[in-house]
């Protein structure tokens, strides 16, 4: 697949009105969305883009909020009869996809997002479970991604893993924090829209007798 090309099936799912069609996301729909977005997200991330990755993260976040465990979500994705890639994922691709899903979950749990708890494989707990608080603190100081600095801070947790692959997964954790911020910002804007109208200037609609005859 070209790095600049999405299948028609994928493009249709990722179109601007897709969110309207998926307001009630079932487990099957979430699994399909994660499956559709994973390969394009990998290709984009290799070039420094994160648009499709954000969509994948948002889908996983939806599963998290619904109380769907990462194990159940992964099982549902594996059960899809028509993989979006047009072929079954290779073992290392499937492992990476599952790792990304677990990274999103463990990041949300570290943030105490919606006060939900899930369990994770020991390997994920011992690596990304320890890294998540580090990157959360780092992001409080700056939202700019600096891969080399992040690696220098977090490499101690990944002694036997390849730097390139670890950095890719750390970027997923970082973008998850971005997605959470964007979702909360949107929720805040919707809350403002639903709030009673207030005068933009203090006293604008108060009775003023100064100029009455």
Image (spheres, rainbow, N blue to C red):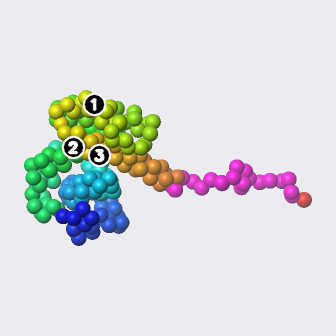
Q: Position of residue 36 (x, y in %)?
A: 21, 60
In this view, the mark in front (1 or 2):
2
126 vs 199: above or below: above
Sequence order check, earlier mark of 1 and 3: 1
Taking depth in this image into account, of 170 and 200 the one nearest to the observer is 170
Name the quadrant of the N terminus. bottom left
Q: Residue at x 74, y 53 (%)?
A: 206
Sequence order check, earlier mark of 1 and 2: 1
Residue 93 belongs to magenta span = no
Q: Position of residue 48 (x, y in %)?
A: 32, 53
Crowdedness near tag 2: few (<14), some (14–19) or many (≥20) residues, C-alpha within 10 Å: few
Q: Residue at x 24, y 30 (%)?
A: 157
**Which residue position is annotated with label 2?**
165
In this view, the mark in front (2 or 3):
2
**Which residue position is annotated with label 1?**
130
How far apart are the alpha carbons under marks 2 and 3? Answer: 11 Å
**Which residue position is annotated with label 3?**
172
Crowdedness near tag 1: few (<14), some (14–19) or many (≥20) residues, C-alpha within 10 Å: some
Q: Secondary structure at mark 1?
A: helix
The main secondary structure of the magenta stretch is loop
Residue 112 seen by the camera: no
How far apart are the alpha carbons under marks 1 and 3? Answer: 15 Å
How far apart are the alpha carbons under marks 1 and 2? Answer: 17 Å
180 vs 16: above or below: above
119 vs 93: above or below: above
Please report the bounds of the magenta region as a residue range: 193-212
Residue extending furthest toward the bottom: 8
Q: Residue at x 52, y 56 (%)?
A: 193
């Amino acid at each position: 697949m070209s790095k600049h090309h999405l299948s028609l099936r994928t493009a249709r799912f990722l179109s601007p009105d897709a969110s309207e069609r998926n307001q009630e996301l079932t487990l099957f729909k979430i699994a399909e969305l994660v499956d559709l977005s994973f390969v394009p997200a990998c290709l984009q991330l290799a070039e420094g883009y994160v648009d499709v990755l954000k969509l994948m993260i948002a889908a996983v976040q939806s599963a998290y909020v619904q109380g769907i465990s990462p194990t159940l979500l992964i099982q549902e994705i594996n059960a899809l009869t028509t993989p979006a890639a047009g072929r079954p994922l290779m073992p290392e691709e499937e492992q990476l996809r599952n790792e990304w899903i677990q990274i999103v979950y463990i990041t949300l749990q570290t943030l105490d997002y919606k006060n939900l708890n899930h369990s994770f494989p020991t390997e994920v707990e011992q690596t990304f479970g320890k890294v998540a608080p580090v990157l959360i603190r780092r992001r409080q100081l700056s939202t700019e991604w600096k891969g080399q600095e992040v690696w220098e801070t977090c490499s101690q947790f990944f002694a036997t893993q390849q730097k390139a692959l670890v950095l890719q997964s750390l970027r997923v954790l970082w973008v998850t924090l971005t997605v959470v911020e964007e979702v909360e910002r949107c929720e805040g804007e919707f809350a403002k829209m639903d709030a009673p109208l207030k005068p933009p200037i203090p006293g604008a609609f108060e009775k003023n007798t100064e100029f009455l005859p």
